[in-house]
Image: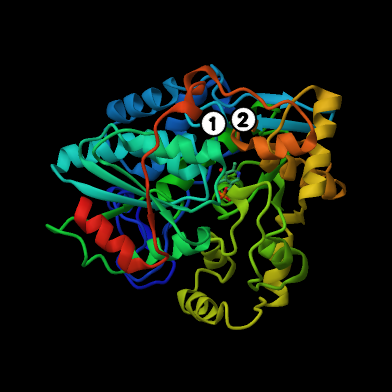
Amino acid sequence: MKYISTRGGCAPQNFEHVLLTGLAPDGGLFVPENLPKLSTREIEEMRSLDYPDLAIKIISPFINGEIPDSDLREIVRESYNGFGNSEIAPLRKLSNTEYLLELYHGPTLAFKDFALQVLGRLLNYVLEKKNKQVVILGATSGDTGSAALEGCRHSERVDIFILHPHNRVSEVQRKQMTTVCGDNVFNLAVEGNFDDCQRIVKAAFADQSFLMDDKQLVAVNSINWVRILLQIVYYFYAALKLGSPRQKISFSVPTGNFGDIYAGYLAKLMGLPIDRLVVATNKNDILHRFISKNEYSVTALNKTYSPSMDILVSSNFERYLFDLFGRNSEALCEFMANFGKEPLSVEEEQWAQVKSCFDSASVDDAKTCRVIREIFDKNGILVDPHTAVGIQSARDCAEKSTAPMVTLATAHPAKFSEAIRAVGLDEPELPHHLSDLLSREERYSIVPNELAAVASFIKAHS
Ligand SMILES: *Cc1c(COP(=O)(O)O)cnc(C)c1O
């Protein structure tokens, strides 16, 4: 299997290349040239597999034999060893039709661990083989940073630079990043918002001439295809638990960069009987406006209780638009060039195609708090604000699907105590391995909101 760029300007690439880069050289995102299609029987046969074996089964066709099976097995099994729940992604029942898929049992307590634990090990494996050093550069709205540091810091083959928006991540999120030790770890607090961080990272990838000794940048954001790939797995895992392939399942996904839900869309294309995919957004609702009104336009950024979704422009949406435009790169380039200048829409037929797969909702902070309270009172479960946005969105869209609805519980509530306090509930305790987090020593640098400042920092420290 080869990978092509959404912008159509570069030759097809192999898996290793896609793993070791970020943006394609033409500024596009890599996507598989074609997807493996699984038959009902093949999906049925996956029912007996545990999580790591299911992951290996699903990702293997995408790796194309570039990593020997036995090595891949070891990498994947080791990646999920450190999870605090033996089921890795346990499913909890909320009501007869509603479920939660708990994706926060990894070392940094958010779903980002599912991909970044594997990505870090794959990187190290390939870099050892090639005898290469690279610079990892990532932007985080809070959770990618710590998961990337945790997944990659043990590799002597990488220097890691993580940009987060200064004063716009939660205290636990910040400390999870800034207390990671290591000569190869650098946290930069950018005086701007997450979109500024993301813009700087994209610009750095587009022109890497500031790097020394022909090093290259590697992405840990979901512009890196491998992030998406590993997230396809838990859609299968949850659906199989609930009776797929015979049973259809719907999912509600708290969405920021459209990475997680894009993985669900791919699972559907691969043959998993997914009924509806609900795009759950907070007040930053560009995707909800697009899906419900065919209007794609930026507005001002709102700061919310679910900061990991405080994003104006979802980078992975380009991957979906590429499919929506019939994989026509020219049409995609034109659409992207006009974005930001005027509100955009797609043709009626295309919009109908969007709505045949996706529903959407936007949930404000007041509703988010109400749901946290309600789930706590009724079910005795404390959900984090991102998950609460997912649950409420699922309910808002409930009449569109009769299939069981699984909301992805994307983070542990202890990461977002501000919202929990606002609801008037006791702050949840951090799991044992993080119990002294708040008293650990922090290390980070504040930098101006500009590429030049970030580039010179990286040059001086890599
Ligand atoms: C990253 C994140 C999201 C958004 O995921 P995307 O793949 O960017 O859409 C939602 N919830 C939490 C807790 C996150 O960390």
Whether ligand 1 has any atom under 8 Å from the Cβ at mark 2 is answered as no
Q: Local crowd at mark 1 within 10 Å, few (<14), some, or many (≥20)?
A: many
**Disc 2 designates what residue?**
414
Amino acid at the residue labelled 2: Ala
Relative to residue 142, is residue 302 depicted above or below?
Answer: below
Q: In screen coordinates, is 458 left or right of 193?
A: left
What is the secondary structure assignment of the residue under circle 1? loop
Q: Residue at x 77, y 29 (%)?
A: 425
Q: Nearer the viewer, residue 319 or 211?
A: 211
Find residue 195 and report its horizontal and vertical position in percent. Answer: 51, 62
Q: Quadrant of residue 64?
A: top left
Is residue 158 visible to the viewer in this orientation of the structure?
yes
Q: Nearer the viewer, residue 213 or 452?
A: 452
What is the secondary structure assignment of the residue under circle 2? helix
Amino acid at the residue labelled 1: Leu
CA distance separating discs 1 and 2: 9 Å
**Disc 1 designates what residue?**
109
Q: Residue at x 57, y 71 (%)?
A: 325
Q: Nearer the viewer, residue 227 or 418?
A: 418
Find residue 295 and report its horizontal and vertical position in percent. Answer: 71, 73
Q: Quadrant of residue 241?
A: top right
Whether ligand 1 has any atom under 8 Å from the Cβ at mark 1 is answered as no
Find residue 438 and report its horizontal and vertical position in percent. Answer: 50, 29
Q: Residue at x 62, y 22 (%)?
A: 429
- Observer-side mark, 1 or 2, equals 2
Q: Local crowd at mark 2 within 10 Å, few (<14), some, or many (≥20)?
A: many
Find residue 200 and report its horizontal and vertical position in percent. Answer: 40, 64
Relative to residue 414, is residue 291 depicted above or below?
Answer: below
Q: Are marks 1 and 2 in contact (CB under 8 Å)?
A: yes
Q: In screen coordinates, is 91 left or right of 398?
A: left
